[in-house]
Image (cartoon, helix red, strand yellow):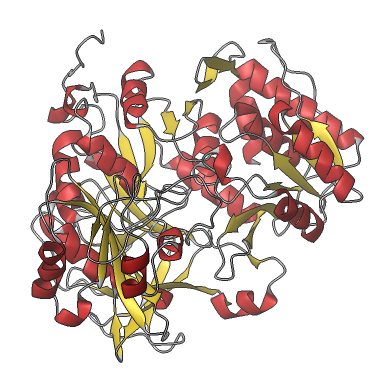
Amino acid sequence: MYVRRILDALGKDPGRVVIHRADEAVTAGRLAGSVRATTALLHSRGVRPGDTVAVLTGPNRPLMLGARYAVHLLGATSVYVRSMNPRTDTETFTVATQAQLLQDLRVSVLLVDDESAERGTWLTRRVPGVTALTVPWGTGDGPAGPLPARLPEPRPDDLATVEFTSGSTGRPKMVAQRYDTREELVSRLAHGLDPRGPATLLSVTPISHTTAPMADAVLASGGRVVLHDEFDASDVLDAFERHRVTDVYLAVPHLYRLLDHPAAPLTDLSSLRRITYSGTPAAPARVARAVELFGDVLIQVYGTTEAGGISSLNPLDHREPELLGSAGRPFPWVRVEVRGPGGGPQVERGVSGEIWISSPTVTAGYLGDEERTGTVFRDGWLCTGDLGHWDRYGYLRLDGRVGDVIKHGGLKLDPAAIEEALMRHPQVRQATVFGVRDRDWVEQVHAAVELYSGAGHTSCDLRGYVAAALTPEHTPVRVSVWPKLPLTPSGKPDRAYLRSVSPPDLAARDAADPPGPGAPATAGHGTDPPYGTAARHGTENRHGADPPYGTGVPRVGGPALSSPRGATARADPVRASGAGHQPDHATSRTRKGVP
């Protein structure tokens, strides 16, 4: 079991620092001690396989790992109930939602930390049968105490975790993951770690969700983890140097902000082995710039919460301009089919269709939603809900979402195509496109953009640019400009929030609500309120919002009739980047004032 492998690794050197968070350095002995003490506490309260234990702690706190490991040592199910893929305190579920989740999941024990203790007490009063316990968090570096005798082994089909992803109705979907799937994830990630030595993983996304299996693999392999509560470009660059980070997972907007940071070219990047990025499709021009800055360490991953990793673009692929707009090739253990509507027969190469996958990393389904489970999971296959096609090289290309198509005037418009056109404008840093129904229920095209500093524009500039690049029908009726595009907790453009603040009746809004202080500039019609910290639901985790899978030799899932220059050699990404030596970009480049 993966937790026992982690404990074995921690036991080899109890004084070794294995987790860094802010000014806190957690030793192997302290983490192992917390795991064993929490296991004993839960066991004494009768937790056994089949029980569900909820965890409510701050995001990216080290003791959250210890809590989950203890739950899994007992063969029980762990569920993190702070939020869907939480990033900050403002993204928490409401107390009412948490109480409902505890009831729906039949939680018996709620593990809390100090900052969550008060809410935990309130929840136990509201939900009968739930006991709140504080996660033990000692200070010793010595050998950890023994585990309870005769711990039960979970069955492969027992549920290990329940994770949340956003649903179309606003209520979180509960995604169930079995123990055999969890083992598969951690084992594959551990097997793919760079052989040059123990890894140092930087996690700027929640360790409770996105990067959890990657952290497990690193700790089981004798590495260490650096935890940041949220993404900050300056802090990330500092961590690269201070902690000699080897691996990092970034959402695409995070990658962009690193590229735009003035200190990035002056930062010592020589320790980096793998930068895995995902979450949304990335602009090829921006990816090419990332290759120039970081060298042969970039890996793009496409995946979903339900599927895990599906395909990847490895470091060699990043040297081929023709491939930068693709989602790469499927991982060796993943089968991909591009099918007709409703899961029909496979379509021909070059024809867009629904992406279906079969993989040992696919989750068990949605708890409490048999209808949705039956629709999405069929006969060993998962419908991702994404649209895509195989290109002439046998690489997967994403064409949007089945549900994201904007229906306007009898036409079906793909937001991704409009976003791509806007991103080609030299003044646009990032763009997202979404549909908004007017008062006649006609869906209109809206866009929100983030411009480069000092950029000037007019409504006609951006709208006319899209019309010239595509068709007049693709032209947004409104383009709002934001200092920074609002993001979901998982780092994706927050279409749900943007849609909620976009006026359905443009003429009425223009007349009644002139621009005011704090509102973003607008190209086109209307104004928006500033993006704040109001509670909101995120969008679906797509294009790899799940644990990075930057290893292995992706298997061609479609016909590869030709190959771009140099793309025939499909080597392991780690070895492709030059195991045993650093690429040319990795010479010592230290920022001013940093030794």
Residue 270 image-quadrant placement: top left
Q: Is residue 111 above or below residue 235?
A: below
**Residue 66 in the image: x percent, y percent?**
67, 31
**Looking at the image, can residue 145 be seen?**
yes
Q: Residue at x 11, y 54 (%)?
A: 566
**Residue 546 in the image: x percent, y percent?**
47, 52
Of the pair 189 and 39, the residue shown nearer to us: 39
Q: Is residue 344 above or below residue 542?
A: below
Quarter of the figure that contains the C terminus: top left
**Residue 442 in the image: x percent, y percent?**
37, 85
Q: Residue at x 13, y 46 (%)?
A: 455
Of the pair 339 and 576, the residue shown nearer to us: 339
Quarter of the figure that contains the N terminus: top right
Of the pair 35 and 456, the residue shown nearer to us: 456
**Residue 430 in the image: x percent, y percent?**
25, 53
Residue 515 image-quadrant placement: bottom left
* Relative horizontal placement of residue 364, taking residue 217 as reference (left or right): right
Of all residues shown, which one is farthest toward the front? 512
Of all residues shown, which one is farthest toward the bottom? 410
* Relative horizontal placement of residue 309, taking residue 590 as reference (left or right): right
Q: How many marks?
A: 0
Of the pair 121 and 338, the residue shown nearer to us: 121
**Looking at the image, can residue 130 be seen?**
no
